[in-house]
Image (tube, rainbow, N blue to C red):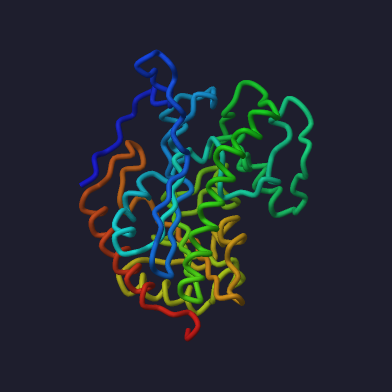
C-alpha cells in the first residue's frame, strides 16, 4: 500500500549540491513509459514537485489542495500491462498542462504578453475563475501570488513543463496508433466530492463517483464512452457523462475519432480513495477502486473502437 504523503511546509524542489558544490541539473518535470498496446494513459495534475521559482504566497498544504492527489498511484499497474503512460511531476497550480497556452490571464503579468490570448467566451469563463494556464486563484478564491509574474518566467514554465508534457502525450498516442491503426487515450483526473467556489462553473455541486467526458462525442466515439459508463455503473458506481466536466485541452487536442484517435477524460471522486482533508489514502477504498480501474483498463485493451 502506498504511504500517505507527509505535509512538509518546505516540500519545494531545491537542487542538491554535488560533491564539488555545483548544483545538479534540475530533474525532468515529465516522465513517460512507452507502451505496446493501443491504450495510452496520462496524468497531468498529480504532480508534487513544487519548483523553487514558484514563489507562491500561500503555504504548501493549501497549494496541494489543487492536486489530483494519488492519481498516479491508482494507475500504477498500467505500464506492466503494456499501456503507454505519461505523468506530470510539476503541480497544476504552477502550470496547468490541461489548458492551451493561449488561456492565460494577462492581469497576472508585469508586462504585455507577446503571444495570442484566448477569445472564446467559454474559455474566458474559466480564466476569470483564476483557472487558466497559470492559476491566479485557489479553488476557494484565494490569490496564489503577492507579486506580478514576469513574461519570462511564464514562458519558462511553458518551455519546461507544458511543451514536454504535450510532446510526450502526442508521441505515445502516435506510436499506439501506428502500431494498431487506432488509439485509445484516457486522460486521468480526480475531483473533490463537492465543488468549491472557484473550482468550476458549478460551485457547490455534489459530484458523482465518476465523470466520463468526450466533449459531447467530439473527441471519442460515444459508443466507447458509453461502454466505460456502463462498465462503471455495473461495478456499483454513480457516473455522469459530459457533466459537469466534458474534457478540456488534452482530449480536445488529441481526440480525433474520425481518424480512430479516441480521447476520453475520466474524473474520479476523491472521497472514494482518500481523506480530502489530510490527503491520506484510505486503504480499503483505494484497493477496491484500483481493482476496478485495472478491470476497466483490461476491458479497454480488448476493445476495438472501429467495431463499436
Q: Residue 158 lies in what quarter of the image? A: top right
Residue extending farthest top? 21
Q: Relative to 275, does residue 154 appear above or below in the rendering?
A: above
Residue extending farthest front? 20
Q: Nearer the viewer, residue 243 or 127?
A: 127
Q: Relative to 57, does residue 224 appear above or below in the rendering?
A: below
Q: Is residue 283 left or right of residue 144?
A: left
Q: Nearer the viewer, residue 21 or 163?
A: 21
Q: Nearer the viewer, residue 180 or 294?
A: 180
Residue 56 location, x and y as percent? 54, 25
Residue 295 location, x and y as percent? 29, 69
**Residue at x-position 69% and y-position 30%:** 108
Residue 223 location, x and y as percent? 50, 80
Q: Residue 94 lies in what quarter of the image? A: top right
**Residue at x-position 71% and y-position 46%:** 102
Total tally of numbered discs in the picture = 0
**Residue at x-position 38% and y-position 72%:** 300
Residue 125 location, x and y as percent? 68, 48
**Residue at x-position 40% and y-position 78%:** 303
Residue extending farthest bottom? 307
Amino acid at each position: 500500500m502506498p504511504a500517505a504523503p507527509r505535509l512538509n511546509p518546505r516540500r519545494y524542489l531545491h537542487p542538491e549540491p554535488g560533491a564539488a558544490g555545483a548544483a545538479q541539473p534540475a530533474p525532468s518535470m515529465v516522465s513517460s513509459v512507452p507502451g505496446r498496446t493501443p491504450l495510452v494513459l496520462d496524468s497531468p495534475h498529480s504532480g508534487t514537485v513544487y519548483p523553487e521559482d514558484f514563489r507562491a504566497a500561500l503555504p504548501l498544504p493549501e497549494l496541494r489542495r489543487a492536486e489530483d492527489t494519488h492519481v498516479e498511484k491508482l494507475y500504477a499497474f498500467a505500464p506492466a500491462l503494456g499501456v503507454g503512460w505519461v505523468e506530470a511531476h510539476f503541480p497544476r497550480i504552477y502550470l496547468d498542462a490541461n489548458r492551451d497556452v493561449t488561456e492565460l490571464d494577462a492581469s497576472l503579468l508585469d508586462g504585455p504578453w507577446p503571444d495570442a490570448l484566448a477569445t472564446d467566451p467559454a474559455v474566458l469563463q474559466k480564466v476569470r475563475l483564476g483557472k487558466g494556464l497559470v492559476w491566479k486563484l485557489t479553488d476557494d478564491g484565494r490569490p496564489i501570488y503577492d507579486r506580478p509574474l514576469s513574461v519570462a518566467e511564464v514562458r519558462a514554465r511553458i518551455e519546461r513543463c507544458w511543451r514536454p508534457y504535450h510532446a510526450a502525450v502526442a508521441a505515445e498516442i502516435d506510436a499506439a496508433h501506428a502500431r494498431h491503426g487506432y488509439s485509445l487515450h484516457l486522460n486521468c483526473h480526480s475531483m473533490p466530492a463537492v465543488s468549491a467556489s472557484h473550482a468550476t462553473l458549478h460551485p457547490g455541486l455534489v459530484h458523482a463517483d465518476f465523470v466520463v467526458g468526450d466533449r459531447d462525442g467530439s473527441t471519442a466515439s460515444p459508443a466507447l464512452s458509453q461502454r466505460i459508463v456502463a462498465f462503471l455503473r455495473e461495478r456499483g458506481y454513480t457516473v455522469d457523462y459530459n457533466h459537469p466536466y466534458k474534457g478540456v485541452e488534452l482530449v480536445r487536442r488529441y481526440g480525433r475519432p474520425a481518424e480512430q484517435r479516441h480521447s476520453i477524460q475520466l474524473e474520479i471522486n476523491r472521497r472514494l480513495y482518500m481523506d480530502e482533508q489530510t490527503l491520506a489514502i484510505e486503504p480499503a477504498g483505494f484497493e477496491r477502486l484500483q481493482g476496478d480501474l485495472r478491470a476497466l483498463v483490461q476491458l479497454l485493451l480488448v476493445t476495438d473502437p472501429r467495431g463499436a
